[in-house]
Amino acid sequence: MCAERAAIAAAIASEGGQHFRLQAIAVVNRSRSFCSPCGACRQVLYEFGPDAVLWFPGETDIEETTVAALLPQGFRL
């Protein structure tokens, strides 16, 4: 499991169960190289905060976008 999904799971467990809503998330790695969330993480992030702001290392700089922009046509259960 990736760090993004582990963080969401921990937040759900400690902060509000199914009512948890993501507002923002930053993704980083030790090498400071390109690191956008994987497909599975994109879907989980979408389920808990499609409008959340997302920052991650891009090809040349820090990218800022929303989860919905990163995963068009995502779905919520």
Image (cartoon, grey):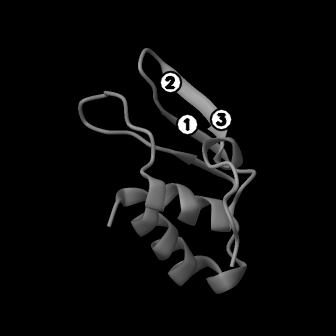
Q: To which residue does mark 1 refer?
A: 55
In this view, 61 is above or below 74: above
In this view, 38 is above or below 49: above
Tell me the number on the disc at residue 65. 3
Residue 65 placement (x, y as % from top left)? 65, 35
Q: Residue at x 70, y 55 (%)?
A: 73
> What whole-number distance in Å separates the C-alpha atoms at marks 3 and 2?
10 Å
Mark 3 vs 2: CB contact within 8 A: no
**In the depicted view, which residue is nearer to us: 38 or 24?**
38
Q: Residue at x 61, y 77 (%)?
A: 15
Q: On the image, which quarter does residue 36 sit in?
A: top left
Pick the quarter of the image with the C terminus.
Answer: bottom right
Residue 13 placement (x, y as % from top left)? 52, 83
Q: Residue at x 32, y 67 (%)?
A: 1
Tell me the number on the disc at residue 62. 2
> What whole-number distance in Å separates the C-alpha atoms at marks 3 and 1?
7 Å
Determine crowd level at label 2: few under 14, some 14-19, many 20+ residues with C-alpha closer than 10 A.
Answer: some
Q: Is 49 placed left or right of 70 in the picture?
A: right
In this view, 63 is above or below 35: above
Mark 1 vs 2: CB contact within 8 A: yes
- The amino acid sitting under disc 1 is Trp
Residue 72 placement (x, y as % from top left)? 68, 48
